[in-house]
Image (cartoon, rainbow, N blue to C red):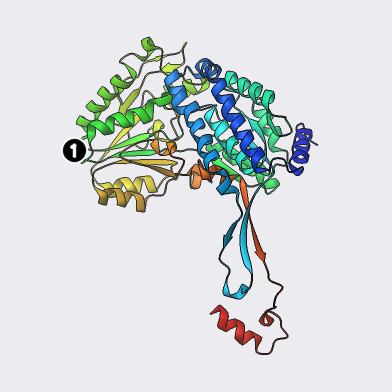
Amino acid sequence: MGKYGELIVKQREFFLQGKTKDLSSRIESLKLLQSIIRTNEKELMNALKKDLNKSEFDTYLTEIGIVLEEIKFTLKHLRDWAKPRRVKSSLATLGSKSYIYPEPYGVALVISPWNYPFQLAIAPLAGAIAAGNCAVLKPSELTPNTSALLAKLISKHFPKEYIAVVEGGVEVSTALLNEKFDYIFFTGSVSVGKVVMQAAAKNLTPVTLELGGKSPCIVHEDANLKLAAKRIAWGKFTNAGQTCVAPDYLYVHNRVKKEFLREMKEAIHELYSENVFDSGQFTKIVSERHFERLISFLNNGEQYLGGKYDHTRLTIEPTILDKIHWGDEVMQEEIFGPILPVLEYESLPKVISEVQSRQKPLALYVFSESEQMQKKILTEVSFGGGCINDTVYHLSSPYLPFGGVGESGIGAYHGKGSFDVFTHEKSILKQTTMFDLPFRYPTMKNGLKFIKRILN
């Protein structure tokens, strides 16, 4: 038995008692989670301020508020989601009734990242609870204050055989992945996602992988440039660009590029001030290693805006890099920081071809008034999800499942998707005993002919 084997055994024993499957118990647990968040809002804000220098506005909007909305939506619909539902029966099963029974997997592992250390830990946890699972939560060691607070709050209000938080670094994640879980939900980088999937394969454990990639943002010549600039500046530089669905790079039509960049400059100054170092409200880079990696991109192309940084505060101001080409270092991997490279285009098919030739992005954004252009992008490019004439906002809707495709992830959650991802749908056929169909048996005369007639 591994280091955490005893914990997993206790959780599995607790799960088998059936308490987590009880619908009223799930609702009670979600309401308790909701209450914990509301009661400790100030503590959460302080922890996120210490870890990432997040402002109270950003913390509520992107961490606390979105999770409370998710739990509220789940509580409203959970009774309907959890009900066994009847489906049609085929002619070949005449006399039977068919049902789908949603059931929890059992013991789930949730590994959450550092960029939204509260939201991306608690949102999937709420889904695991709603579906009736026990759960082990492994938060990121790069945001220690938030992780410690999560551990404190969860252990105070939930028994560890039901929900447990395990803190630590890579060695802890590795040890947990060596255990047998019934489901693994991971949010993080593509490289670590591959490690998680490899570990899960040893036990044939199903996974959800919420990864990332270089998400393009296309600004066509007919776009509302002022509005596009404001929405792109918000989506890119919120959380200092440390967002998996942030626009990673811009493709701007060459006819409007100069005007658009002027609008971007104004939008950035309006939203984040002309000096983020003086304002003290701009999110910092999570670690020195990430900071050093980001500032190495600053010599790519030409700096149109920004480029300044403060090593002591791990802060980089919103930066736009112009004259960028695909061969530049900044275009080789997901940026995950407040640096926005700009490419220009004349031909839309060339843009589509460039995006298609690379790994499938988690998100894609299109700014255009042309429905034909929008449709062309949507039908020809594969990506996780996105927006037309906006950025990032698709994450806010509980009616839109969020997830990647290909290299950007496996599976989707949010809203009912969060319940579905932690749920196995068990198919059941209830057969009548009032009569028995003889054609199913090999003893029936001309049975094969009869079966062919029914199936055809």
The percent coordinates of residue 279 (x first, y second) are 37, 12
Q: Where does label 1 land, which residue?
A: 255
Residue 150 to residue 418: above or below: above
Q: Is residue 36 visible?
A: yes
The percent coordinates of residue 437 (x first, y second) are 67, 79
Residue 312 to residue 411: above or below: above
**Which of the two residues, 403 or 335, is positioned nearer the viewer here?**
403
The residue furthest right is 1
Q: Is residue 296 visible?
A: no
The percent coordinates of residue 146 (x first, y second) are 57, 21
Could you tell me which secondary element the residue under label 1 belongs to?
Answer: loop
The percent coordinates of residue 176 (x first, y second) are 70, 34
Identify the image quadrant of residue 345: top left
**Which of the two residues, 41 or 31, is positioned nearer the viewer here?**
31
Placement of the N terminus among the 4 image quadrants? top right
**Which of the two residues, 30 or 239, is positioned nearer the viewer here?**
30
| Amino acid type at mark 1 | Arg
Q: Residue at x 62, y 73 (%)?
A: 93
Specify whether 251 is left or right of 222.
right
Residue 186 to residue 205: above or below: above
Q: Residue at x 31, y 45 (%)?
A: 351
Specify whether 315 is left or right of 89.
left
Q: Residue at x 57, y 22 (%)?
A: 142
**Which of the two residues, 115 or 22, is positioned nearer the viewer here?**
22
Disc 1 packing (10 Å; few <14; some 14–19; many ≥20) = some
